[in-house]
C-alpha cells in the first residue's frame, strides 16, 4: 500500500509539494481513502490500498490545513481565505465559508459543528451540514494551529 501511494504521488508530480494529510475522526467512514492537500492548490483523494487517485478538488491557494473527514464530508482550509466542505466520495463541494484571511488551521468536528481558526484572528463555529456561521470569537492573534474540543470547551492558541 505504502509503495502504491508513493508511486501515485510521484506520478502526479506531488512528491515534495504535499503539505497536509488527513486527520482521523472517530465518525469517519472513508477508511480506504487518504486525503492530502498540496502546494499546487489541490486536495487529493487517494485510494489507500491501490494508490489510485479517486478525485481532486482545486482551491485558490496552497493547502496547509490537514483535512478532517466526518460523516462523509471532508473539511479543509486553504490559503485562499476559504474553508471547504466536500463530499468524501465524489469531491463535490457541499459548501464554502470565507474568512478574513488564510486558513492553515485544521478543523475539528463535534456535535454537528466544525471549528476552525484563521489568520484573521478568529475561531469560527460552523454548522457542519450547511456551513452557516453559528459564532466567531476574536482571539487577538492569528490562529495557526487546530482547535481542540473537550468537555464542551474549545481550546486553541493564538500567535
Image (cartoon, grey):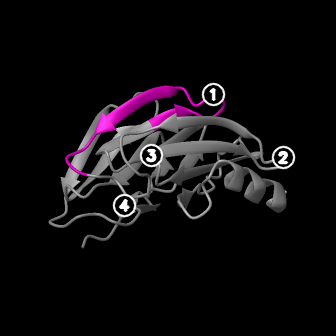
Q: Counting other residues with Cα less than 10 Å from the Cα at mark 1, is it few (<14), some (14-19), or many (20 or more)?
A: few
Q: Residue at x 55, y 50 (%)?
A: 68
Q: Which residues are magenta?
A: 85-101
Is disc 1 placed on a helix, strand or loop? loop
From the viewer's perspective, is the residue at label 3 or at label 4 nearer?
Answer: 3
Residue highlighted by disc 2: 50
Q: Residue at x 47, y 39 (%)?
A: 112
N-term-proximal mark, 4 vs 2? 2
Is disc 4 placed on a helix, strand or loop? strand
N-term-proximal mark, 3 vs 2? 3
Q: Is residue 72 visible?
A: no
In screen coordinates, is 19 left or right of 82?
A: right
From the viewer's perspective, is the residue at label 4 or at label 1 nearer?
Answer: 1
Report the disc number at residue 69: none
Report the disc number at residue 41: 3
In screen coordinates, is 139 left or right of 77?
A: left
Which quadrant would the N terminus be assigned to in this image? bottom right
Amino acid at each position: 500500500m505504502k509503495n502504491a501511494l508513493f508511486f501515485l504521488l510521484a506520478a502526479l508530480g506531488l512528491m515534495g509539494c504535499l503539505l497536509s494529510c488527513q486527520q482521523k475522526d472517530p465518525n469517519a467512514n472513508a477508511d480506504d481513502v487518504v486525503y492530502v492537500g498540496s502546494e499546487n492548490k489541490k486536495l487529493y483523494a487517494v485510494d489507500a490500498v491501490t494508490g489510485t487517485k479517486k478525485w481532486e478538488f482545486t482551491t485558490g491557494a496552497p493547502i496547509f490545513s490537514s483535512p478532517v473527514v466526518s460523516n462523509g464530508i471532508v473539511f479543509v482550509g486553504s490559503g485562499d481565505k476559504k474553508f471547504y466542505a466536500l463530499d468524501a466520495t465524489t469531491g463535490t463541494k457541499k459548501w464554502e465559508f470565507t474568512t478574513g484571511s488564510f486558513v492553515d488551521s485544521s478543523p475539528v468536528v463535534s456535535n454537528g459543528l466544525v471549528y476552525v481558526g484563521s489568520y484573521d484572528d478568529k475561531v469560527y463555529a460552523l454548522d457542519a451540514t450547511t456551513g452557516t456561521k453559528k459564532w466567531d470569537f476574536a482571539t487577538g492573534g492569528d490562529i495557526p494551529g487546530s482547535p481542540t474540543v473537550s468537555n464542551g470547551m474549545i481550546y486553541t492558541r493564538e500567535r
